[in-house]
């Protein structure tokens, strides 16, 4: 998906414009340039899949900058980072920056950009705000997400390029490759096993991130919770209009191509239908089993 066009400085301005008390507002406003620089550094690193190299942004501002901000505002040194984190919770989600929050949350058609399935009822900090306070309200670090994905992703800090989930704004090339597959076996009923199996031509960092993404967000469990209805629908449709193995293979092949176009080639639906095409057991009557 396209990265947000929102300006980091403008979002920060909106979120901090009416921060209370006034000494906190003064301290936060004094950090605008630092936040904008952090946003620029993040964007450059993310484009190079190198977010793990942003160590100079961890737990910042600290040291001299924090002391300077404290002197200017009477705010305590330890309070600066907390106030930055609160700028997301109190001043963006529940404050003057809400318009930007809603815009980002709805940017993937209202869906979670991490699983493509759940409703985006929150924003996920790609790099967690607990470790990177300066990125708390930086738009390119905020991804529309469902609570489930947000929960599983946790606040982990990446230690290397492959040690993180796919970034919807910067890792779009991952969709140039086919890497999600499903194996369908039976009897008694269709059992579906999803797996990530990137081709050799896929860049190693994207392959590593696809594996990490699938495992960390426990997508196998999510997808398996959805297939029952889809298989029941398909089985009942075929019961109405039965097809022989060759015709059914052709029908499922066409459906998998439609699912790839509509849902994405690495969506669970496209993978499921590709798996059904490959399952001789299913083609030769396995689809009937649960509804006999
Ligand atoms: Zn999700």
Image (spheres, rainbow, N blue to C red):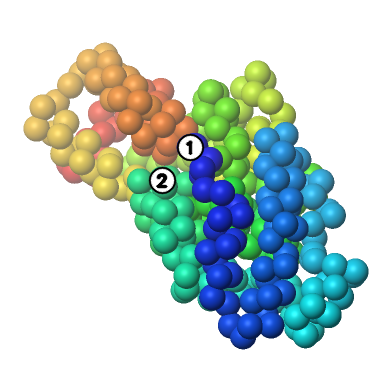
Residue ID at (51%, 44%):
4
Residue ID at (48%, 37%):
1
**Residue reaching furthest to the left:** 240
Give residue 117's position: percent from left, percent from top. 39, 48
Q: Is residue 134 left or right of residue 273?
A: right
Examine the rendered structure and indicate whether residue 245 appears above or below residue 140. Answer: above
Q: Residues within 10 Å of mark 2 (few under 14, many from 20)?
A: many
Q: Nearer the viewer, residue 285 or 14?
A: 14
- Ranked by sequence position, the earlier of labels 1 and 2 is 1
Give residue 11's position: percent from left, percent from top. 55, 58
Distance between the alpha carbons at the discs numbered 1 and 2: 7 Å
Q: Quadrant of residue 276?
A: top left
Residue ID at (63%, 83%):
22
Q: Residues within 10 Å of mark 1 (few under 14, many from 20)?
A: few
Q: Is residue 160 left or right of residue 274?
A: right
Where disc 1 sits, the SS reads loop
Residue 79 seen:
yes
- Disc 1, disc 2: CB below 8 Å? yes
Residue 128 seen:
no
Location of the C terminus (image quadrant)? top left
Q: Is residue 148 left or right of residue 204?
A: left
Q: Is residue 99 left or right of residue 163?
A: left
Examine the rendered structure and indicate whether residue 54 appears above or below residue 207. Answer: below
Q: Which residue position is annotated with label 2?
A: 108
Give residue 121's position: percent from left, percent from top. 41, 62
Q: Which residue position is annotated with label 1?
A: 1
């Amino acid at each position: 998906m396209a990265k947000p066009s929102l300006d980091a400085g403008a979002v920060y301005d909106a979120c901090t414009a009416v921060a209370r008390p006034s000494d906190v507002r003064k301290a936060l406003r004094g950090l605008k340039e630092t936040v904008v620089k952090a946003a620029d550094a993040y964007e450059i690193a993310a484009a190079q899949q190198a977010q793990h190299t942003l160590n100079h942004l961890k737990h910042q501002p600290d040291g001299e900058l924090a002391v300077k901000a404290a002197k200017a505002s009477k705010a305590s040194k330890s309070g600066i980072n907390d106030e930055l984190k609160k700028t997301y919770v109190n001043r963006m989600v529940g404050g003057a920056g809400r318009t930007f929050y809603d815009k980002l949350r709805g940017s993937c058609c209202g869906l979670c950009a991490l699983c493509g399935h759940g409703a985006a009822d929150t924003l996920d900090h790609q790099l967690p705000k607990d470790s990177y306070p300066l990125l708390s309200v930086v738009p390119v670090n905020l991804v529309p997400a469902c609570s489930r994905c947000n929960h599983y992703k946790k606040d982990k800090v990446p230690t290397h390029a492959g040690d993180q989930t796919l970034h919807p704004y910067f890792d779009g090339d991952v969709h140039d490759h086919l890497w999600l597959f499903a194996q369908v076996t039976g009897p008694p009923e269709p059992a579906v096993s999803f797996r990530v199996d990137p081709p050799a031509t896929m860049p190693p960092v994207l392959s590593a991130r696809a594996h990490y993404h699938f495992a960390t967000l426990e997508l196998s469990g999510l997808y398996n919770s959805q297939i029952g209805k889809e298989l029941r629908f398909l089985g009942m449709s075929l019961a109405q209009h039965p097809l022989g193995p060759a015709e059914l293979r052709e029908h499922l092949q066409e459906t998998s191509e439609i699912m790839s176009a509509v849902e994405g080639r690495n969506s669970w639906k496209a993978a499921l239908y590709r798996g059904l095409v490959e399952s001789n057991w299913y083609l030769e009557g396995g689809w009937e089993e649960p509804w006999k």
